[in-house]
């Protein structure tokens, strides 16, 4: 019995071993290969010699699509790294490239400490060359300048200010100090007499508008009777959203982008998220704009501001003041210290499969002239998705709304500055501020709504075969309004000008196999454009005043003219008859009846009833 029991036990034990082996084999077959053949690599990147952390350094496993960026403490984590011998590459602008040999084991590996030395030649930087993939600077025989926002001594107020004086051959001609005025950018000067001399601009690989927006000028009469300023589309970008700017000049740009790029190329790369906890930033800027003396010693502001101007009189009472006030005096100033304020914030973060960067900004700038203001709101969202090991999708979107109001200036008989400069020899024959103030009773508005969005797909089936597909859409809607109300001192009949312009689209496909590059681009400039230059005449001179009788409401017709919303007012020369007139603080003080008897032949002076 004892022997029989032992034999039975041995048989049962043998069966248990076989069953366990079968179950173990079955479980092994169902375990995902990634869990059995991958490991996690983590570490920290610091500056050689000082030990300071290097933020936003690119950390990547060579010959794979596994990579990330370091956080604010210089730390990084790489998941699902294949086991075995691997090469870890660490790169950051301004530092020598680091290459580390790893022996990756399953699970969490020993933390790696990578130290990068500071470089001066910067030949190992990865730059974008118009091809599907980046290349190191030493591999490119072209002139490429790279600007880092982090290297700017002070936060730039605009992209133009960021480019000014930062790279050889980049010239910025400012368009003036008026609100919303932009400049012209030239790379190595003018290069063509038949094509545009404005460089081509790319934002995150999307071809965008580079030519300036249309000037806000009236569509009838002398076209110089406007603000005579031009906004630059490059200033629609919030400088705090930019990571770096690459500038390609001369024949190098023509070689990479074609003859249309003979004036150069400016590539703007915005910030992106990285794996880690959300990181919040907030910035507030406050300041003021002040016009510096530009005239002679005896008349430093050319009558815009008295040379002995003081806010307070010698007896301590308020003196001087603003000429744009309802009751100006002879010692007033047409200039002011324009308050400038800006508020911006952002959040960035994400995981290994998705990273994000979201930002928003609001700015309000007052100019030095009475009617100059600019209010801008911008927002951006950059999202990156690691769909597969060899497939990455980037989605970038920017929206900007800019509302600009200007004072009529320049060589403009209806403008303020020209008449103030000429003093008694102006179009009034007087330098009395009470007369000149009437020139402020006009509105020059520019509203710009712009959307730039695009998707970039990077597909790398092999380490030597790279594909990049970018489709983008740049839509800019510009509305120009130029109003001289009925009864305006220099145009009694009144003028309303209205323009609406819609500007473009972009498509790009690039394939790279080894050193062979194939580019296919379709860029229909101004793919859809609508231009409405037709002037809506308020009333022509000599229009029969009898047709003005009755109460008009917004939306009703007066002859062939539709009364716009909010434009009901009263005419100073037609005895309180309802006419088109802007509702603004500057138009509330009505001039006395009969002030312009020679400007309205239909209503002779002295015919208005008393009261």
Image (cartoon, rainbow, N blue to C red):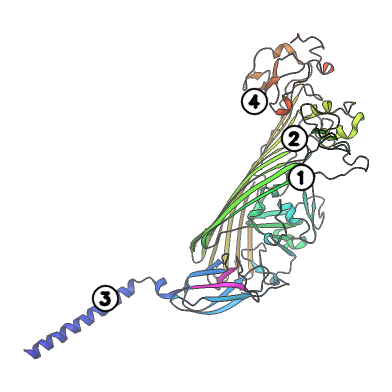
Q: Earlier in the sequence, mark 3 or mark 2?
A: 3
Q: Nearer the viewer, residue 160 or 329?
A: 329
Q: Circle 2 is placed at which residue position?
A: 371
Q: Closest to the observer: 121 or 304?
A: 304
Locate residue 67, reporting x and y percent.
Answer: 54, 68
Name the residue at the left extreme: 1
Please name the residue that numbered disc 4 is placed on. 566
Tell me the quarter of the image containing the C terminus: top right
* Magenta stretch contains residue 62: yes
The residue tagged 1 is 289
Residue drawn at the location 35% of the way across and 72% of the way down? 31
Residue 330 x %, y %: 86, 29
Q: Nearer the viewer, mark 2 or mark 4?
A: 2
Circle nearer the viewer, 1 or 2: 1
Q: Secondary structure at mark 1?
A: strand
Q: Residues within 10 Å of mark 2 (few under 14, many from 20)?
A: many
């Amino acid at each position: 019995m004892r022997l029989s029991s032992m034999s039975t036990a041995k048989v049962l034990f043998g069966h248990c071993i076989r069953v366990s082996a079968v179950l173990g084999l079955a479980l092994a077959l169902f375990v995902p290969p990634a869990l059995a053949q991958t490991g996690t690599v983590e570490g920290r990147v610091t500056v050689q010699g000082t030990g300071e952390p290097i933020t936003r350094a690119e950390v990547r496993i060579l010959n794979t699509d596994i990579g990330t960026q370091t956080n604010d403490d210089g730390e990084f984590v790489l998941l699902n790294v294949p086991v075995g011998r691997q090469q870890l590459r660490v790169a950051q602008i301004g530092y020598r490239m680091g290459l580390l040999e790893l022996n990756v084991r399953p699970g969490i590996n020993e933390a790696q400490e990578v130290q990068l030395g500071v470089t001066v030649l910067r030949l190992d930087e990865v730059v974008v060359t118009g091809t599907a993939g980046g290349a190191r600077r030493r591999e490119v025989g072209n002139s490429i300048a790279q600007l880092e926002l982090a290297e700017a001594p002070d936060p730039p107020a605009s992209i133009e200010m960021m480019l000014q004086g930062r790279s050889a051959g980049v010239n910025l001609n400012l368009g003036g100090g008026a609100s919303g005025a932009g400049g012209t950018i030239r790379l190595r000067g003018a290069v063509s007499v038949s094509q545009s001399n404005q460089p081509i601009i790319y934002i995150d690989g999307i071809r965008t508008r580079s030519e300036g927006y249309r000037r806000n000028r009236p569509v009838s009469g002398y076209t110089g009777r406007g603000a005579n300023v031009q906004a630059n589309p490059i200033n629609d970008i919030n400088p705090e959203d930019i990571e770096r700017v690459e500038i390609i000049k001369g024949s190098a740009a023509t070689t990479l982008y074609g003859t249309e790029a003979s004036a150069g190329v400016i590539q703007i790369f915005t910030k992106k998220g990285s794996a880690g906890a959300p990181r919040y930033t907030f910035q507030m800027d406050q300041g003021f704009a002040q016009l510096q003396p530009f005239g002679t010693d005896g008349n430093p502001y050319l009558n815009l501001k008295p040379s002995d101007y003081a806010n307070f009189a010698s007896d301590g009472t308020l003196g001087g003041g603003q000429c744009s006030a309802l009751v100006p005096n002879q010692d007033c100033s047409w200039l002011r210290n324009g308050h400038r304020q800006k508020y911006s914030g952002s959040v960035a973060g994400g995981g290994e499969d998705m990273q994000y960067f979201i930002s928003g900004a609001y700015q309000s700038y007052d100019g030095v002239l009475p009617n100059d203001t600019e209010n801008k709101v911008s927002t951006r969202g950059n999202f990156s998705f690691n769909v597969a090991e060899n497939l990455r999708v980037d989605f970038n979107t920017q929206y900007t709304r800019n509302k600009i109001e200007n004072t009529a200036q320049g060589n403009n008989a209806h403008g303020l500055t020209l008449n103030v400069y000429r003093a008694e020899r102006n179009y009034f024959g007087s330098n009395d501020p009470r007369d000149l103030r009437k020139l402020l009773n006009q509105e020059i508005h520019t509203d710009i709504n712009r959307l730039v969005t695009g998707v970039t797909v990077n597909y790398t089936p092999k380490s030597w075969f790279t594909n990049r597909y970018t489709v983008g859409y740049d839509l800019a809607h510009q509305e120009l309004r130029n109003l001289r109300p009925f009864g305006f001192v220099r145009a009694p009949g009144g003028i309303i000008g209205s323009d609406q312009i819609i500007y473009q689209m972009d498509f790009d496909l690039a394939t790279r196999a080894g050193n062979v590059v194939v580019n296919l681009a379709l860029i229909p400039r101004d793919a859809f454009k609508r231009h409405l230059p037709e002037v809506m005449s308020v009333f022509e001179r000599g229009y029969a005043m009898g047709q003005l009788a009755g109460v008009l409401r917004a939306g009703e017709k007066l002859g062939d003219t539709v009364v716009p919303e909010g434009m009901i007012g009263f005419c100073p020369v037609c005895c309180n008859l309802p006419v088109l007139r802007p509702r603004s603080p500057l138009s509330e003080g009505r001039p006395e009846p009969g002030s312009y008897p020679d400007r309205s032949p239909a209503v002779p002076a002295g015919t208005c009833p008393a009261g």
